[in-house]
Every structure is written in C-alpha cells, then in structure tokens.
Amino acid sequence: MVQSKEKNKRALPPTYLFLALVVIVVLHFLLPGKQIIAFPWNILGIFPVIVGSLFNLAADKALKKHETTVKPFQKSTALITDGVYGISRHPMYLGFVLILGGVVVLLGSLTPYIVVVLFPILMEGVFIRIEEKMLEEQFGERWSSYKAKVRRWV
C-alpha cells in the first residue's frame, strides 16, 4: 500500500513540461549563446506550439472518450490505436516536445535547444519505458501488434 501512495506522489508529465519551459527561458536570458533564428523567422515557432497543443488536446479527448486514465503508472482500461495514437504511441509526449521546440524557435537562441534534446530522453527514462511495459502486460498481443505498426514518437 505504501508503494502505490509513493507512485501517486511522483511529478506528472505537465510538471516536467513546465520545468523544461522555465529552464528554456532561463537559458535564453542567462546563457543565450548565439542568436540563430532572427525575426521574423522565429515567429514560425508558433506552429509547433499549436500542433503540440492540438496533439495533447486530441490525446486527452481520446483517453476521456475511451474512459481510461491519462495519468502515468495507472492501469489503462483501453488501448487506443486511432487518431493521434495512430501517428505516435505517445502523442502527449510528442506534443510536449513540439511545444518546447516551438518556444525555442520563438526565442531564437542556441543554448535552449539542449532542453529539447534532453526532454524526450528524460520522458523515455521516467515514464515511457514503464508505461509501455504496463501496456504490454495489460494488452498482450494487441499491444505487440499496435507497437509493430506505430512508432514510439513519429
């Protein structure tokens, strides 16, 4: 029982997104490095922010439609394989990376890109590996078939 309470106290992925955004802004203002994307080209960063946000909204809507959990480490009651889940096995994490990448483009400086590179590695280690193991245990062959058709990221 104590173990499940500890799992519930883990920071959720949106917290990691928020912290990554903070680190990006801090790096931009304290250690910007070279300005590599100038105005007006940096405005193009709005597109990945919008697409990433739409991925997250669509994934959340699909999870609610199928009445399964959005929270990591909780048992899923449905395996969703269509919509954004037909593009990526983890569209919310992909959406987060797109949002981070878009913000970095909007800011235009070099050093914040390190966050965009490290964030998916962190998500793999903290969430994705465990989630995929749980899904494999829960859905067996259905999961294996889905996994063979749809890539983890894109």
Image (cartoon, helix red, strand yellow):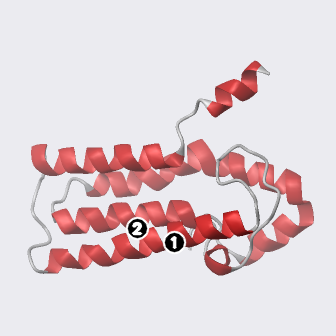
Q: Position of residue 93 (x, y in %)?
A: 52, 60
Q: Position of residue 99 (x, y in %)?
A: 37, 64
What residue is at 74 percent from the left and 24 percent from the top? Answer: 3
- Quarter of the image where the C terminus is located: bottom right
Which label sits on residue 98? 2
Between label 2 and label 1, give the one nearer the viewer: 1
Q: Position of residue 148 (x, y in %)?
A: 77, 73
What residue is at 45 percent from the left and 60 percent from the top? Answer: 96
Q: Amino acid at mark 2?
A: Leu
Q: Which residue is mark 1?
A: 55
* Left-right relation of 50 to 129: left
Is residue 65 shown above or below 23?
Answer: below
Which label sits on residue 146? none
Identity of the residue furthest to the right in this view:
141
Q: Amino acid at mark 1?
A: Phe
* Left-right relation of 28 to 93: left
Is residue 75 shown above or below 44?
Answer: above
> Helix or strand or loop: what does disc 2 sit on?
helix
Disc 2/disc 1 C-alpha distance (Å): 9 Å
**Disc 2 to disc 1: CB gap under 8 Å:** yes
Q: Position of residue 44 (x, y in %)?
A: 24, 79
Q: Quadrant of residue 143?
A: bottom right
> Which mark is first along the chain, 1 or 2?
1
* Left-right relation of 71 to 133: left
Q: Quadrant of residue 7?
A: top right
> Helix or strand or loop: what does disc 1 sit on?
helix
Is residue 19 shown above or below 67?
Answer: above
Structural crowding at the residue carrying mark 2, measured as other residues with C-alpha within 10 Å and reported as few (<14), some (14–19) or many (≥20): many
In this rendered view, identify the residue nearer to me: 9 or 152: 9
